[in-house]
Image (cartoon, coloured by chain):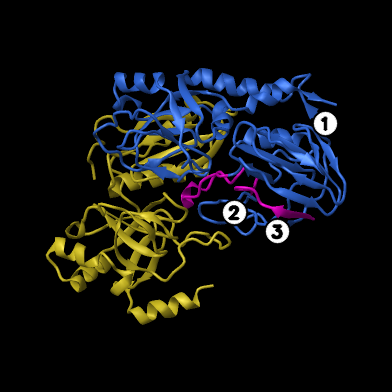
């Protein structure tokens, strides 16, 4: 069992979510930086989507009541095991009685504590992910609290390596320039507004959450016509009437009625999830073909030599 | 029905590098819902490679896919032969769900406003709302939130100028020509005309959502004491 001594700012159990429930109005959810979660699990021989802790800005402190193999993935946090600095992106044996203080995010926003076997909470609607907004999944549908105890699932599977090449770990690091494809209502905005969107620098608002990254800065002119509520996806850049964009994150409502000027590409969704309040961000246009190539490149690197190291 | 589809419909638009938006109508209507549900059923019956999710809405179906497995062009080729013919009627509902609703007191804080706009008494407005027959167009916004077709035009009322911070679970709301049900407390700007004691979304229940797209819905007015009784019986 693993005991939570202090929960940090917002620590939840997350896996790769529950896609496919559009009929119920349920968002896919899961790890905001899904790529980091996958890499962490691959270093443990877990299934890619084994459940881990997602820490936000300030991580939890946990006590391992039994020994475990652990990987810290995602944003760099100043983590310590029994007072000694703990490297990220590397499988580390934690002895029984070990105290892991995840610490604060040095840069980026979200870090993952992956354990061999994954955290064993009951799946709800096909996933162990916590839906924070609605309050289900994970541990009783809520963020972790001091005193919570979680068990670890059976360990099986061979890791792809014990640590990861430093350059590879930076793939999911924070990025100040997110690449976008045109949104389904891109043409509603007019060339000047699209140009403004692509040339301005925005700042990440403190009111951002797993639902969406809210941006501050010079407002964009929102289109006058109103949109009929339609299905939306993570990465969609909505422009509400006030003109300050909201970029949907993994726990977004399944439908929305604001026009969308663009969509952050799949390969940059992890970087989007790593933005923290106060960060500056810009958007750069790419074609759909380029977006797909960037994603396939990233996937290919999971099997490239020199990425996973012994 | 032999009416032709409006010009430019259906439209297939890339919604992102991982989604195709199929626009099948210009707004909420039985015809649009018929087309959305028909396409959804056809794609669910024979899912194309890489399909991840189908998100129906009033007049569109969002087809989310895994860009590692497929492309917009490949999905469009799978969708095109399944596009419903223009003028397809909405099929009779496979089931009708009776939803008890209390239209009284604090269950219906905006009923008086809606009634005033319609030139009716609150009791008459409640009768009108309950007498209409509804169909679930889709679930969205929040898990289990049902958007219904069939609001009598007389009861159409604009949203509140300032949304409430927390709408009580089970509230029945009106926004313009829309009516719908809030499964859990969320902020919301719809006018609240009643409240059901039924749990609309229970993740551990099968099915998790009380209502499904295409269902017929009948509101059954209940007095306040029955509302309290039924709420207490809830699991």
Chain letter of the residue beneath label 2 in the structure image: A
- Residue at image mark 3: A148
**On screen, residue B182 above or below A77:** below
Q: Residue at x 26, y 53 (%)?
A: B159
What is the letter of the yellow chain?
B
Specify whether residue B104 is in view.
Answer: no
Dot label at residue B39: none
User: Left or right: A104 with respect to A26?
Assistant: right
Q: Residue at x 56, y 24 (%)?
A: A175
Mark toward the viewer: 1 or 3: 3
User: Left or right: A250 with respect to B10?
Assistant: right
Chain letter of the residue beneath label 3 in the structure image: A
- Residue at image mark 2: A125
| Pointer 2 and pointer 3 on the same chain | yes
**On screen, residue B199 above or below B60:** below
* x and y, in percent, of residue A152 in the image: 78, 51
Magenta region includes residue A3: yes
**On screen, residue B176 above or below A48:** below
| Pointer 1 and pointer 3 on the same chain | yes
Callout 1: 10 Å neighbours few (<14), some, many (20+)? some
Give the CA separation, mark 2 to mark 3.
Answer: 22 Å
Mark 2 falls on what kind of element?
loop
* x and y, in percent, of residue A308 in the image: 78, 25
- Residue at image mark 1: A162
What is the letter of the blue chain?
A
Give the CA separation, mark 1 to mark 3.
Answer: 29 Å
Q: Which residues are magenta?
A: A1-29
* x and y, in percent, of residue A289 in the image: 51, 18
Mark 3 falls on what kind of element?
loop
| Pointer 2 and pointer 1 on the same chain | yes
Magenta region includes residue B68: no
């Amino acid at each position: 069992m693993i005991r939570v001594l202090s929960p940090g700012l917002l620590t939840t159990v997350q896996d790769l979510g529950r896609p496919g429930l559009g009929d119920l109005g349920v968002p896919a959810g899961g790890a905001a930086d899904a790529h980091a979660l996958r890499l962490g699990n691959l270093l443990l021989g877990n299934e890619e989507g084994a459940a881990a802790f997602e820490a936000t800005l300030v991580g939890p402190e946990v006590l391992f009541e039994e020994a475990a193999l652990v990987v810290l993935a995602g944003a760099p946090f100043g983590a310590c095991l029994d007072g000694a600095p703990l490297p990220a992106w590397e499988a580390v044996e934690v002895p029984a009685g070990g105290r892991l203080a995840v610490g604060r995010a040095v840069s980026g926003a979200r870090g993952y504590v992956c354990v061999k076997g994954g955290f064993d909470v009951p799946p709800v609607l096909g996933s162990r992910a916590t839906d924070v907004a609605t309050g289900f999944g994970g541990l009783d549908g809520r963020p972790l609290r001091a005193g919570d105890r979680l068990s670890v699932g059976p360990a099986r599977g061979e890791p792809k390596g014990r640590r990861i090449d430093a350059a590879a770990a930076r793939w999911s690091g924070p990025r100040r320039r997110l690449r976008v494809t045109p949104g389904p209502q891109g043409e509603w905005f007019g060339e000047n507004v699209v140009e403004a969107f692509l040339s301005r620098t925005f700042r990440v608002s403190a009111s951002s959450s797993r639902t969406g990254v809210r941006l501050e800065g010079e407002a964009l002119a929102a289109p006058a016509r109103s949109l009929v509520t339609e299905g939306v996806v993570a990465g969609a850049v909505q422009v509400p009437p006030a003109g300050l964009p909201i970029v949907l994150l993994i726990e977004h409502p399944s439908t929305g009625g604001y026009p969308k000027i663009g969509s952050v590409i799949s390969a940059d969704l992890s970087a989007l999830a790593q933005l923290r309040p106060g960060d500056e961000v810009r958007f750069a246009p790419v074609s759909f073909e380029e977006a797909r190539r960037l994603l396939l490149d990233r996937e290919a690197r999971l099997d490239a030599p020199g990425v996973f190291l012994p | 029905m032999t009416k032709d589809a409006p010009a430019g419909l259906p439209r297939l638009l890339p919604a992102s590098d991982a989604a195709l938006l199929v626009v099948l109508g210009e707004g909420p209507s039985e015809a649009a819902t018929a087309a959305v549900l028909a396409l959804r059923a056809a794609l669910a019956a024979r899912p194309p490679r890489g399909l991840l999710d189908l998100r129906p809405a009033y007049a569109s179906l969002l087809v989310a896919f895994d860009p590692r497995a497929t492309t917009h062009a490949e999905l469009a080729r799978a969708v095109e032969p399944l596009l419903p013919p223009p003028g397809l009627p909405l099929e009779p509902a496979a089931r009708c769900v009776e939803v008890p609703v209390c239209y009284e007191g604090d269950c219906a804080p905006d009923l008086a406003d809606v009634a005033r706009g319609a030139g009716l008494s609150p009791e008459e407005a409640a009768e009108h709302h309950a007498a209409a027959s509804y169909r679930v167009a889709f679930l969205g916004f929040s898990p289990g939130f049902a958007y219904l077709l069939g609001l009598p035009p007389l009861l159409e009322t604009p949203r509140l100028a300032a949304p409430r911070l927390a709408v009580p679970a089970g509230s029945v709301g009106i926004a313009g020509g829309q009516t719908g049900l809030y499964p859990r407390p969320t902020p919301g700007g719809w006018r609240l005309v009643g409240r059901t004691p039924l749990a609309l979304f229970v993740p551990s229940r099968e099915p998790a959502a009380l209502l499904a797209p295409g269902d017929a819905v009948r509101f059954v007015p209940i007095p306040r004491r029955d509302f309290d009784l039924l709420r207490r019986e809830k699991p």
